[in-house]
């Protein structure tokens, strides 16, 4: 899981909670602990990482690649970050 943490941390820092919720639930993730999607990244990261740890390696890689794709799209057009995130969850 080590390579996943920087990618997901970057995503959590840059994307509002409600869009993160849509992104992760779009992958069918279940969260064993409640997530305060309206909280700051400090409140969100721990339950997300715990849920990711419960995934198979293939599922984690799928989420990691989606996160990288969103990050790359946002770097080329920062104002379109949310649009890129929504597109990714539609394509998942």
Image: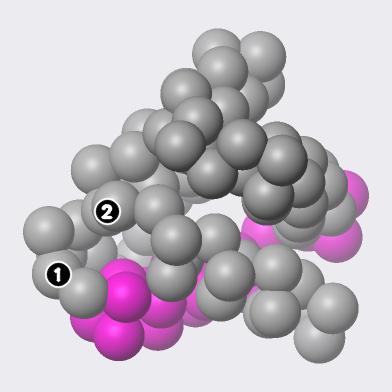
For the C terminus, give its image quadrant.
top right
Residue at 34 percent of width and 39 percent of height: 19
Quadrant of the image occupied by residue 43: bottom left
Give the x, y percent position of residue 3: 84, 78
Give the x, y percent position of residue 32: 35, 65
* Marker disc for residue 66: none
Give the x, y percent position of residue 27: 57, 34
Left or right, 85 with respect to 73, comes to: left
Task: Determine which residue is flagged by label 1.
Answer: 39
| Camera sees residue 13 | yes
Q: Earlier in the sequence, mark 1 or mark 2?
A: 2
Quadrant of the image occupied by residue 36: bottom left
Crowding at label 2, few (<14), some or many (≥20) Cα neighbours within 10 Å?
A: some
The magenta-colored residue range is: 41-58
Quadrant of the image occupied by residue 76: top right
* Marker disc for residue 17: 2
Above/below status of 8 relative to 84: below
Residue at 58 percent of width and 70 percent of height: 10
| Camera sees residue 34 | no
Which structural element holds mark 1?
A: loop
């Amino acid at each position: 899981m080590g390579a996943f943490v920087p990618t997901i941390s970057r995503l959590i820092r840059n994307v509002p909670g409600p869009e993160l919720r849509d992104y992760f639930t779009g992958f069918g993730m279940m969260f064993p602990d409640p997530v305060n999607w309206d909280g700051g990244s400090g409140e969100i990261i721990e339950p997300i990482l715990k849920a990711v740890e419960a995934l198979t390696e293939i599922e984690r890689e799928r989420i990691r690649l989606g996160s990288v794709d969103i990050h790359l799209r946002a770097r080329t057009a920062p104002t379109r970050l949310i649009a890129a995130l929504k597109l990714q969850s539609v394509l998942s």
